[in-house]
Image: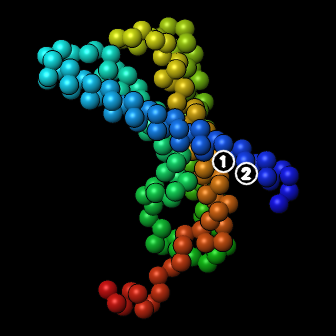
Amino acid sequence: MSTVGTIFNSAIEVLRKVVAWIVIVCFIYMTVAVLAQVFGRYIFNYSISWTEETAKFAQIWVVLMGAGITMRRGLHVAVDVLAAMLPLPLMRALLVLVASGCIWFLGIVIYGSIPLIELGWMFETSPVLQISMWIIYLCLPMGAFYFGIEIILSVIKRWDQPFGQPPSDDSMSAS
């Protein structure tokens, strides 16, 4: 493998670890915050106002960053029965077409999130903690960018078998 390929693979692995840690930390925090809210409300009869807000923000980060992790593991829902029956060149063309559409959409998400981040930077604060909302909105372009990277890597990984093996006649007659 070339030096560029090694550096690229190392950078991807570092990015994947950073994203995984963001998701883990946010998920753990979200769990602790919700438990604190439940204990505070039902055991001590005291509502901790900021835990609900921060748990929502952590959940948003988990979902938007976790979408890329889900893509990497191939866990997004896909209906590919008909696509798997196509000849390999058409499967590859369809794979590229679908990936291109997804990346186009993610580009729109990134482009659309820039004004939102600017608005959050200048004017918006969270209702309870009064933190600047750009920190929360930043998960939109970051999650979309990471998701796009995983889509591209998925296309490369699946190039030889874009939609898996088509079902054989034997397996269809058995059911």
Q: Secondary structure at mark 1?
A: helix
Q: Residue 9, which numbered label? A: 2
Residue 137: percent from left, percent from top: 50, 24
* Residue 143, numbered label: none
Q: Quadrant of residue 89?
A: bottom right
Q: Amino acid at mark 2?
A: Asn
The span from disc 1 to disc 2 (Cα, nearest Å) is 6 Å
Residue position for label 1: 13
Residue under the image location 83 percent in, 60 percent down? 1
Q: Residue at x 52, y 52 (%)?
A: 71
For residue 48, side relative to residue 109 (left or right): left
Q: Using the image as rendered, state which of residue 11 and residue 165 is in the foreground.
A: 11
Classify mark 1: residues with Cα within 10 Å, few (<14), some (14-19) or many (20+): few
Q: Quadrant of residue 43?
A: top left
| Type of amino acid at the residue the image marks with label 1 | Glu
Q: Is residue 53 left or right of residue 147?
A: left
Q: Which residue is pictured at 52% across the width and 30% down the height?
A: 139
Dots 1, 2 in contact, CB < 8 A: yes
Residue 92 at x, y percent in the picture: 65, 67
Q: Could you tell me which secondary element the residue under label 2 belongs to?
A: helix
- The spot of residue 164 in percent (x, y) is 54, 73
